[in-house]
Amino acid sequence: QVVPMDEINLHFTGDFHAIASAHNLLSAMLDNHLHHGNALGLDVRRITWPRTMDMNDRALRSIVIGMGGLNGGPTREDRFVIVPGSEVMAILCLARDLADLELRLSRIIVGLTRDRKPVTAGELKASGAMTLLLKDAILPNLVQTLEGGPALVHGGPFGNIAHGCNSLVATRLGLGLADIVLTEAGFGADLGAEKFFDIKCRFGDLKPDAAVIVATVRALKMNGGVKKDALGTPDVAALRRGLVNLEGHVQNVAKFGLPPIVALNRFTSDSEEELACVLDAARSWGARVALSEVWARGGAGGEAVAEQILAALKEGKADFRPLYDVALPIKEKIETIAREIYGAAGVDYSSAADKAIAQCESMGLGNTPVCMAKTQYSFSDDATKLGRPTGFRITVRDVYPSAGAGFVVALAGDIMTMPGLAKVPAAEAMRVHADGTIDGLF
Amino acid sequence: QVVPMDEINLHFTGDFHAIASAHNLLSAMLDNHLHHGNALGLDVRRITWPRTMDMNDRALRSIVIGMGGLNGGPTREDRFVIVPGSEVMAILCLARDLADLELRLSRIIVGLTRDRKPVTAGELKASGAMTLLLKDAILPNLVQTLEGGPALVHGGPFGNIAHGCNSLVATRLGLGLADIVLTEAGFGADLGAEKFFDIKCRFGDLKPDAAVIVATVRALKMNGGVKKDALGTPDVAALRRGLVNLEGHVQNVAKFGLPPIVALNRFTSDSEEELACVLDAARSWGARVALSEVWARGGAGGEAVAEQILAALKEGKADFRPLYDVALPIKEKIETIAREIYGAAGVDYSSAADKAIAQCESMGLGNTPVCMAKTQYSFSDDATKLGRPTGFRITVRDVYPSAGAGFVVALAGDIMTMPGLAKVPAAEAMRVHADGTIDGLF
Amino acid sequence: QVVPMDEINLHFTGDFHAIASAHNLLSAMLDNHLHHGNALGLDVRRITWPRTMDMNDRALRSIVIGMGGLNGGPTREDRFVIVPGSEVMAILCLARDLADLELRLSRIIVGLTRDRKPVTAGELKASGAMTLLLKDAILPNLVQTLEGGPALVHGGPFGNIAHGCNSLVATRLGLGLADIVLTEAGFGADLGAEKFFDIKCRFGDLKPDAAVIVATVRALKMNGGVKKDALGTPDVAALRRGLVNLEGHVQNVAKFGLPPIVALNRFTSDSEEELACVLDAARSWGARVALSEVWARGGAGGEAVAEQILAALKEGKADFRPLYDVALPIKEKIETIAREIYGAAGVDYSSAADKAIAQCESMGLGNTPVCMAKTQYSFSDDATKLGRPTGFRITVRDVYPSAGAGFVVALAGDIMTMPGLAKVPAAEAMRVHADGTIDGLF
Amino acid sequence: QVVPMDEINLHFTGDFHAIASAHNLLSAMLDNHLHHGNALGLDVRRITWPRTMDMNDRALRSIVIGMGGLNGGPTREDRFVIVPGSEVMAILCLARDLADLELRLSRIIVGLTRDRKPVTAGELKASGAMTLLLKDAILPNLVQTLEGGPALVHGGPFGNIAHGCNSLVATRLGLGLADIVLTEAGFGADLGAEKFFDIKCRFGDLKPDAAVIVATVRALKMNGGVKKDALGTPDVAALRRGLVNLEGHVQNVAKFGLPPIVALNRFTSDSEEELACVLDAARSWGARVALSEVWARGGAGGEAVAEQILAALKEGKADFRPLYDVALPIKEKIETIAREIYGAAGVDYSSAADKAIAQCESMGLGNTPVCMAKTQYSFSDDATKLGRPTGFRITVRDVYPSAGAGFVVALAGDIMTMPGLAKVPAAEAMRVHADGTIDGLF
């Protein structure tokens, strides 16, 4: 755990707010441009730039703006995405420095003209002010573990709807300061790891030497069919059924040329037999594996995993390579990811996605990586398909250009770029007392 | 000038962002409540709680949310207000401490049930988490002048659409630390001063001893009919015509029992004759007056004004009293302000305002102060009526409860709670260079 | 009563349906024009042409159309008006023949370009097809009274929201066929009669010879303050209080140069004293007056009124003249009507109305009659002001061009161009039985 | 051709208008019910009853209604369908008499409560008044051919988006009056014929004795890949390629137990070799076939087809049976139609369709026929797949209950229930001259 955890979970250093401001400034300047005569000739029906808010707000998923006659500017359909899904977040995380940040922001495509030419943030003269709003946000944030170890926490593009990696600036800072840098890639390795390798490493010329896959007995039992409230009961049979999920991730990592290291995160409810079962299985697949007991024992509890990592580095067998050639057509890239990483039988495209892909390729975005947006609960795009499903097809329902980030986003299945709150939101239990103590935040 | 000015104009300490987050959390919880069955029985047509964004975004003035079928929750009309117009901003500025903050937040009325009973943020269980999001924002921010003088910059409810004063916490902190505290009340004295006296002083038990009215030759000439691009040319005749505006403000301040001190802010383009004209006039109305040359000469340039203030304090003739008795009916309070401060002949109410006033009174908000929202460009609600107009009527087009802040807001004329960008937004000229220097922010 | 009354209350000869089709064809062609590139350069925010439906449908008063991305064409705000408020209805009622109908339809202004030039139905090439859809609707419909007397029922522009007269074609047909033609002008004489004289007579070169004002004891008692459920009880005092209303109408009619004839419609609940009271009062104002007992006695019951009409015709004192000169500015025309006919102290204009009037005058509609849209329940624009109110002001909240009809429409007070259903709609009680008998229609 | 053709193409006897009025009355009463408190507890997000208009109006495909605060009633998403796609049209065409009409109207499901119970037109007390509005529309309309032959023209549910057959009342009237009745089922035999057999014949206890399939050389060449502007040039090779389309329809008809008779409609541009090619092919499939020359020679030109029909009737081999058992689950019925009639490899369902099917079955609509809505341009749901495609899958994107009509509607592919106008609408060329002659209607 890193501190100050409560601040990290609240406003922290304000990076998310700055990203939201920069993003929404572009939105406001876009609609202002329409209001004042639309000199760039944007087709109001073909605007793809959304607004953003750092809030799980279902009611903003799909909206109509510009109501109220002349006062409100042109009426049009719009949508809010959550800040971790904003292209500005992706850009901040992929930019090398302030100049690159401004360049990338200027390339953002906000929509098309009636003859389908892209219109950019640069043409709207928004990228300078957006960069200004991000001038502090681009600086990495240094925090520490409870034992004083340094950690950089910077950027938060969610691994399901965005590229799932912390900032390139922070990673490069780490590489400049330390011998070994561990970086997290969000959600399942089918999402975070694939995008870390195919997007961030490619853009940042990073050459990872090993891949750590974090596993838990509980999650594997869930993949074996156990309900959430029964996960505390030992169930080796279910665990064995669920192991195919971990095996899939181990095999996937190897496809990028990296030695897989499984870190099995120990919970107090895990039985020895269960733990042994996972460790044995991982070894049988040729992976390195070790128990991680950081939760119970702090840094000392992580030594076993650290030793496996060091051993892998010493062995030096890594031969990192991205999964696909960016020069392939967009659909081939999507299908490569779907078949190789997800285990899908194929990919279906909605007619909207077909048109959007053709549009992206006609705008020169055909040779960029693809950032898949997909549920994190399954290798497939159907959250209920657990374990390691086969024979399924991935449905790509829409594709968006992220020309500033440098990729195209493909939305698979029902994935939403704006979450909703639960029936009983966690916020209902949150309080701060007069003495500054906090309830309900964790 | 205070530093760091660029930060103050950008994200500063993040207070505005925190206010926006707290505000929009309530919005999201409200729509989430509707989506999950509306147990509190809110009438979807009678929801008054808006969303907020710290952006001049005309297109968000009037919107429809919750589109997209079941996914988006109930469809309804909504609107965004700018953060300085958020009731959460007003509450933060009027709360005495964290406990009072939470109490006030819990009293926010988000809408009505079908039988017109108010529903509050407290009933939605949102006020605890909102307070948590504001735990740092409630702490005043200390900055300094270029000469090292301390200044507290805290809160920003605009004087036209909100109550126009910095936070009570900051003012009380100042009073605890210094012999004399100067505090600013936004926009014209018809707006900022009236609301400072009738709202903030009343709520905070503050007893001001003098009122400084800042005047410029340029603004008075504009009130005398001179166009913006001709303000640099001496024009004593126009200045004399415009002096009635300043006279109005001087007379208004006296109605609160305070000695008026005019600080005449010198510009390089002002002629000696013009300056003398204002100084003489102010003295003829019985006001203290002095030239302020802070822009050119720093702190020393303010000494003449300071001496007048000290003299007034020494004289000790202040007998502060609010303008109206809060126990009066809402319409009488509005009419008192309109006649006494604005010089109006009367007040007209739209039928929406009539109904809203009756509703406010039926909810127990009849005996609170009224926070007028009105253009800052005229004593009237018509921005084109300069000088000191007479015979006009004020039109109140709507009234909102601000039960958490402790007042009701009356919207006069065409005043908007969400501004728009200019045809050429200032943002177009903003840039930050690699060395950190900034263009276009001032 | 005329027959077939049930058909007249249902689809009749389909004229309303034809008008709706012609109206909505223009709407569809307009949005289709926007969808296919907007070659005429319409400003989507400045479209004023609504859609129409022959249904009291509150939910269609204010809508957003063109949702669903590219499939739906440009998103914009729209509204439905009821068919009797459609400009096509007004045009059908004012056209002299098929050629004039097409010409007028082609002049309909659907909206403005960004530089505020009007765009017409003719420019959208819609007027030919609209005329085709109206080719049968323009033919008057002949029905008969229960005693076999002929009556022309043709057109239905409501007297509150439209010009309130049947078609000019029907009136001219009547004048060609009979010595004396009686024509009805809808709702109160402040609405129907004023517009009959100032719009229809002016356009159709009609010279009426007398004006019959229909009065009832019940309505006069209501104007004297009696509640609806007490109208059956004799109350001469209340009746006397309400007589000022009738006096107003009598005096108004005289302002057009016509002899007023009051037809007092007898109800079974009227007392002899009440009837005498009205008859005496009318005579004291110099009006002709007679009891009408058509409901009880058929044609014979109308003879007394008919004799008064014949006497007035014989006397030949009519000197018909419209109330105002069309060459006056729009505001002067509105104020003439408001002061002379309604008895108002003056007129206030919303800023929207101010702009719309200026726009109408800039488009060459400054010298047309004004068609007031106002509640029929009061001389004022406030339905609760009964009797003959004085000292009130009329509020004009918006003004629409009706260039095809040849006038501008001024909306006063809260008048709606799309009614709503009652809490228990009359339709709930309607049925047709297998034998064709009908319940609930009357 | 039947006369009066122009009237049939305009308002005719007003049946479509009456259907629109009845349909929209239910819509207005529904929203009025919501406005006045929603006593039936409808879930505003789960209302499926649309509005309707007899106009190709793309902009009404997807709309938001009830805007404007309290005045407009609850805001919600809505859509307009074209009148031929209205459930009221289907009901009118399937009702046996006035009583059955009212019963069916009362069964219309307008939406669901929050706990997913259906709410009907009967519960809204709308079905009586709706029936009243349809009292004349239910009576069949008799017209005649140019040679005086009688024809009944009654009802118009389009074959692509609705069940595609004229009214049962008209068919039964014909059967009571003539020895042989020919009835048309709209669009391709995969749509109109399948729904005639599976819906109308099933509901009306009709037992057809033969099926006439109308073919043209031109359409078959288009199915063979010829562009529209080259259809006038003889091209036997393309014709042969396209013949698989006709073969599919012939084989489909046989699956209902009926002898197929191909009527080859002769065009002046058809070559003798092309005609012979089709005639020979049809005979080789075992179908009866004859040239139809009605366009050129009137009734006499139809004798050859008539003789084939008579011969088929005389042969008496018909053994009519519907394609599927209505007791099958909805998905099995859809898949039977897709495989047997369309030649699809299978059916995919959107998640919306999955939920809607489960909902329909839970409401007791599981054992009704399915009315497929699908493009008429292809056996598949993709209008570009000509000839007789194989291996394709049908995508069902949504399913609606039509409880009054007695079936469920399945929307396949991109089929729209509200068409749009062309870039140059046919209406632009329409005119009626003073003498009544009409341009541009045909």
Image (cartoon, coloured by chain):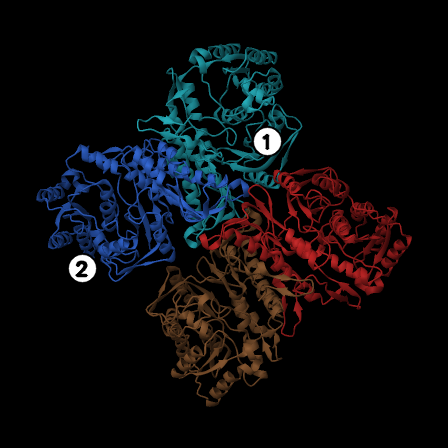
Chain colours: A cyan, B blue, C brown, D red
Image location of residue B433, percent across then percent down: 35, 34
Quadrant containing the N terminus of chain D is bottom right
Q: Are marks 2 and 1 on the same chain?
A: no
Image location of residue C382, percent across then percent down: 39, 64
Say which of D289 and C179 sits in front: C179
Residue at figure coordinates x 44%, y 40% from the top left: B30
Relative side of D207 to D9, left or right: right
Q: Nearer the viewer, mark 2 or mark 1?
A: 1
**Which numbered dot is residue C122?**
none
Q: Amino acid at mark 1?
A: Asp
Picture quadrant of residue C279:
bottom left
Relative side of C179 to B154, left or right: right
Give neighbour class at mark 1: few <14, some 14-19, many 20+ (Cα, 10 Å).
many
Q: Cα distance, mark 2 to mark 1?
A: 76 Å
User: Is C261 located above or below residue D118 in the figure?
Assistant: below
Say which of B60 and B332 sits in front: B332
Residue receiving disc 1: A381
**Which numbered dot is residue B237?**
2
Relative side of A434 to C30, left or right: left
Image location of residue D52, percent across then percent down: 60, 55
| Label 1 residue SS | loop
User: Is B290 located above or below residue A418 in the figure?
Assistant: below
